[in-house]
Amino acid sequence: MSDSRPTPSPAAERPAVARRWTPRWIAGVIALVVAVVGTIAVGLQAGSDLPGGPDVLRVASATRLAPTDPAPAARDGRLALAVEGVAFPDLTGRPLRWQAVGARRDELGGRAITTVAYRDPAGVAIGYSIVAGAALAANPGDGSVERDGTTYRVFNRGGRITLAWERDGHTCVVDAPPSVDVQRLVDAATAGA
């Protein structure tokens, strides 16, 4: 007698292996995600928690963030927003013609930073930040401009121009694209004096 059943193929003889999300595999993925997020968080914290608080270039990066609050109203050459008595300037007058378009508040290295975003009629935007508390340590910068007894330190980094100075014991930072002339930034800085 012969067996009339077909011979199974080698693939049919192997049992089907179901791909499952095993608890061990899920735990591995979660551990990887936690490690990556932890590394990023530690890097950000380490970058902003320097002794003495943030530095000028880190504050400059905050000036580039999008506003989260409406623009403060202007009155008597100043905006209705100040940091510990140091008011932001109204820059709408000639020759500057920068309109305040919004504001935001951040914390960097345990220091409060308040920023006003301004935009000129051509659409060029700048950010102007005032750091709460005592003035930051003076970074040397790439150069400086002296005007009316104040030293304005100039930084050229990452395709941006940053100006930093001390006003009433606070560090002020203005950051702009390279199309903005340094003298125009100094004009903006002196408008608040």
Image (cartoon, rainbow, N blue to C red):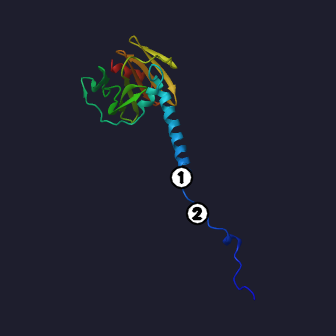
Percent position (x, y) of residue 187?
A: 38, 21
Residue at image mark 1: 23
**Compared to 143, does 116 lie above or below?**
below
Q: Residue at x 33, y 20 (%)?
A: 192
Identify the image quadrant of residue 82: top left
Number of residues whose C-alpha sits closer than 10 Å to that of mark 1, classed few (under 14), some (14–19) or many (20 or more): few
Residue 114: quadrant of the picture: top left
Of labels 1 and 2, earlier in sequence is 2
Q: Secondary structure at mark 1?
A: helix
Instruction: Identify which residue is drawn at 56% across, 47% down.
Output: 28
Residue 86 has which mark?
Answer: none
Q: Which mark is residue 18?
A: 2
Instruction: Tell which of 171 and 92 is nearer to you.
Output: 171
Nearest the eye: 193 or 106: 106
Query: Picture coordinates of residue 117 (x, y %)?
Result: 36, 32
x, y percentage for residue 112? 37, 26
